[in-house]
Every structure is written in C-alpha cells, then in structure tokens.
Amino acid sequence: MLHYFKVSIPLIQEFKTSFGVQYQREAVILRYYDGEIEAFGEMVSDEYPGYSYEFNDAEIIVIKKYLAPILKKTQDPEEFSKLTEHIKGHNMAKAALEMMLYDYISKKEEKPLYKFIGRTKGYADVGISIGISSIDATISTVEKAVNRGYKRIKVKIQKGHDIELLKSLRGKFPNIPLSVDANQDYTLKDLETLKKLDDFNLEYIEQPLGKDDFIGYTKLKKEIQTKICLDESIESPESAIMYIEAGIADIINLKPGRMGGIGNTLKVIDIAKKNSVGLWVGGMLETGIGRSFNISIASLEDVKLPGDTSPNDKYFWKDITMEVFTMENGRIYPFNNPGIGVTIDYPNFIQVMKDGEKIID
Ligand code: OSB
Ligand code: MG
C-alpha cells in the first residue's frame, strides 16, 4: 500500500535564500505498508520551483502517473531505479520512492539503514546553513552556532549581500571554517565580486552560477582561487562526471533526494573519490524522515567534510517524527533502529497535514 501525504510545517524563523523566502517547509511524505513493515520516504522538492524545476504538485502527478505503476513491479531499489530510467528527469520524485525502498529493505533485513549501506564512520560532522538576514543578525546567529559546536558555518549570499557581510564576519570571526552559498545568483558579469571572495579564506563557494552554466564555470574556475562546490548542478552521476572531468567541481554537496536516490549518490561518491573531489551531505529543510536518510549517507567513510545535517530543532518547534537527533561536539549520529529508525508523531502529523491520498492499494 502506498500513500502520499503533504505536510506544511511552520519554520521558527523564515529561511531566506537568493531564490526566495520560506516561512514553512511543505514536504511530501511517502508511506509504504505491506501489512508488516512500514517504510517512509520524503521528497525534497518544495511548494515553489525556486531551487529546481521540480515542485511538489507537479512531482505528485509524476509519482501517481508514472512512478507508482513501476513500484508495483518491484520493491528492489536498484531495479526500481533501472525501470524508471526511461522517464526523463524528475530525480526528486524518483529519489523519494527509491529512498523509501531503501528504508523498506533495510527494515526487512532488520538493520539500520547506515549499516545496511555499509562503509560507515558511525557519525557525521555537522555544519550549519544560515539564511539571509541583516549583517548584525547574521553575526549573532554565527556566534550562537560556533558556541553550539558546529564544525563549519555556511552563510547564504546573493548579489549585493556578499562582500560587506563577509568583511563583518571575518572581522568578528577571523578563523572559523566559513563558506558561502549563492544558490545560482551570479553570472560572469559579476566576476569582479566573485574574485573578491578570494580575500576571505573561504572553505568554498557553493553554486555561484546557474546550474547549467557550464561555460560560465569553466571561465570562472580560471579566475578565482577559492574552491567551487556544486549543489544544484549535480542532478545525477552523469552531471557529476561532466563537472568533475572538466575540473570545475572541487567539492560536491551530495543530496540523495536531488540526485535520484541512494544508488545514484553512491555512484557519485565513487566518481568523486577517484578524482579527489571533496564531499559533504546537504539538506533541504527536511523533516526527521529526510534528515535521517541524509545523516545515514553523511556517516559514510568517504564523506569527509562537515555537512548541512543540523538537528531539526534549528528549523521546527515540532517535527513530525518522535526521535530527536542530538548533536554532540559537532557530531550527529544515525539512529540504530531498523531502516531510518524514526517513528511518526501522528498527533502532530495530523495537525500539519494538508492533504494525502492512497496511490496503491
Ligand atoms: O542550497 O543547500 C541549499 C535549503 C533549501 C534549499 C536549498 C538549500 C538549503 C540549505 C539548508 O542550505 C540546509 C539544511 O537543510 O539545513
Ligand atoms: Mg546549496
């Protein structure tokens, strides 16, 4: 039996990026139940296509019309991925179901997902992603984050909100591991600004240019010293090969939910490893369900850099899952129950649920 549920969870503080402001996280949760095992997936798309062309209402159609019929044929995640290859794009929709199947099969084998996947460190190092606000407010958020033990501070930037912000931050925190995320806001016309970012000893610049601006990146790479980290550009193993072989991607922000799922993520990790590309796992303001998948991947041996897998109390007053991730000394640990190891807080789930439907009987 397959259900989807759309939930809308208010954020403690709005989350502003160069592509928009979010006041709530609208998540699509997939629930698979075979009479015995209950498995979950979470789609990383949002209400509005600002981060990607994918958005919830469209992807729900893709799931209902094209992906659910394939799920009837196989419950094996690798086979599911193969059978969905002829459907172009929509990797967020594919990932939601593929990851749900990983939860399902690891529960079937009574193993926690991170042990089912293997090659784990048993923990993930955690950084924080800080949305756009005033310079003063950002300084106070960074101060709290540093005190809480986050191992890397990432601040969102956009055109006109970059150099002054970094001058102030470096004035107050000269030595913290700091990075910036532009979410595609710049073009080569902004080359002078992008060059100035070299002055701030950043760990990397995340996604400065458009996701498909391959030519822009090849030119930018020759002009700046700061490492380039790609997020939106890496939608699949194929796009990872393209940006790695061209020498553009120094670092990749892995998001299984953006790259078609765990199988593709493992492929990207292999390609990155062979080419000495740095890796960390990002986030999309997921609920405890999506977060748990991300933390399992972030705990892999080959994922060495601190990621955006902060505990969810940063975003929500109340999550839809019962279990709470805690961070100790900048480390977060995957749960040891089978699968993703979370259970649904149904009273809260019902409160935040907007709609839902049974897709497969
Ligand atoms: O670019 O990494 C991003 C959130 C929504 C959409 C895109 C991004 C983000 C974040 C938040 O940076 C990371 C998190 O979930 O904590
Ligand atoms: Mg990003």
Image: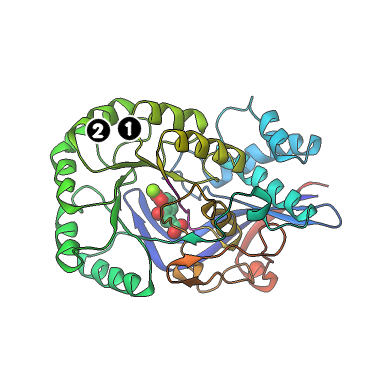
| Quadrant in which residue 337 is drawn | bottom right
Residue 248, disc: 1
Range shown magenta:
279-285
**Local crowd at mark 1 within 10 Å, few (<14), some, or many (≥20)?**
many
Q: Which residue is mark 2?
A: 221
Secondary structure under the numbered disc 2 in the rendered image: helix
Task: Evaluate whether residue 5 shows in this view.
Answer: no
**Image point (65%, 57%), residue name:** 355
Q: Can you give x and y, in whole percent of width and height, for residue 213 in the image? A: 33, 30
Q: Please name the colour scheme applied to the rendered image.
A: rainbow
- Residue 281 belongs to the span the image colors magenta: yes
Taking 174 as reference, is 184 above or below it? above
Q: Can you give x and y, in whole percent of width and height, for residue 150 in the image? A: 38, 66
Query: Left or right: 187 with respect to 30?
Result: left
**Image point (30%, 37%), residue name:** 209
Mark 1 is on which residue type? Ile
Q: Can you give x and y, in whole percent of width and height, for residue 358 in the image? A: 76, 50
Sequence order check, earlier mark of 2 and 1: 2
Query: Left or right: 111 with respect to 197?
Result: right
- Residue 292 belongs to the span the image colors magenta: no
Mark 2 is on which residue type? Lys
Q: Residue furthest right?
A: 35
| Quadrant in which residue 110 is drawn | bottom right
